Amino acid sequence: MEARRGVLIGSALAAVGVFVAVLVAYLLHWQPLTRFDDAALKPTHRFGRAHHGWVVFWNLYCTVLGPTVFRLVTVVVIVVAFARRNVRIAMFLIVSVELCGLVTEIAKTLVHRPRPASALVHAASSSFPSGHAVGVMVGVAALLTVGLPLVDPAKRAWLIALGVAVIVSIGAGRVILNVHHPSDVLAGWALGWAYFVVCLLVVRPIRPITQPDETPAVPDTAR
């Protein structure tokens, strides 16, 4: 248990380091970061301008699997958790998934990086970090944490792989649509993971959602 906790803390610290490094590089107008962002945005913008259906697909994909949908799905899981008297899991999902948008908006407001001028679709608010990257990272990680204990161990690796694919593809989709610089997405993934780990360590949803936090005493058993 302590080893697992140490790995989680180490990964969170590494994620914070990545977030800070990208933020500092942007604030200092570090040219390698600018070239890195432009190298991805320019070709995807040209392709998107020439293929409208491609843009429509990615815009729909990022909407269907976006943070808002994850929060709505999580609301259902929270209700089920409360109904099964598993308050710890419900609180974990509230703090992690439902409140991560607030963390994102605070970061966006403080940094206030403009969206890429080449954006192929409309996107509200500022650019850094990517709200989709943060929200989907936290949503996938939190729901897997709650759901994996209920799944056949042989199938857990497939679910984790599916979760990783969703996280990566949504981040890529935001760059393909040119509504985010790649560095926004990288920072979003880092912030999302660090926030998830903090929530996991503080709230610790240790029981499966099918088990209550406390088993009520059977009447008339205490003498």
Image (cartoon, rainbow, N blue to C red):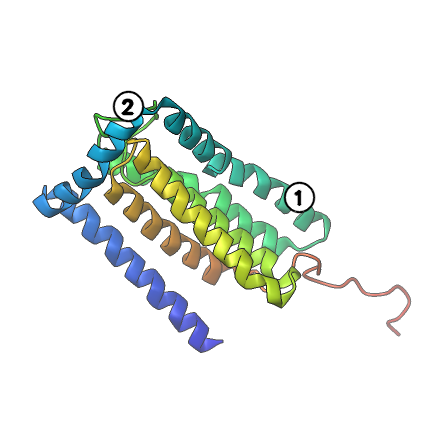
Total number of numbered labels?
Answer: 2
Give the Cα separation between the discs numbered 1 and 2: 43 Å
The mark nearer the N terminus, 1 or 2, is 2
- Identify residue for label 2: 49
**Extreme-right residue of the structure:** 220
Q: Nearer the viewer, residue 205 or 137?
A: 137
Badge 1 vs badge 2, beta-carbon distance below 8 Å: no
Q: Nearer the viewer, residue 212 or 120?
A: 120
Q: Position of residue 198 (x, y in %)?
A: 41, 58
Instruction: Residue type at mark 2: give it.
Output: Arg
Instruction: Residue type at mark 1: give it.
Output: Val
Q: Position of residue 75 (x, y in %)?
A: 60, 40
Q: Give me the residue at 11% from left, 47% from top.
A: 32
Q: Are there few (<14), some (14-19), or many (20+) residues within 10 Å of tag 2? A: some
The vertical placement of 178 against 185, above or below, is: above
- Identify residue for label 1: 79
Corner quadrant of residue 196: bottom left
Q: Position of residue 172 (x, y in %)?
A: 34, 42
The vertical placement of 164 against 180, above or below, is: below
Q: Secondary structure at mark 1?
A: helix
Q: Give me the residue at 24% from left, 44% from top.
A: 183
Q: Secondary structure at mark 2?
A: helix
Mark yes or no: residue 92 visible: no
Q: Nearer the viewer, residue 42 or 125?
A: 42
Q: Give me the residue at 34% from left, 26% from top.
A: 123
Q: Are there few (<14), some (14-19), or many (20+) residues within 10 Å of tag 1? A: some
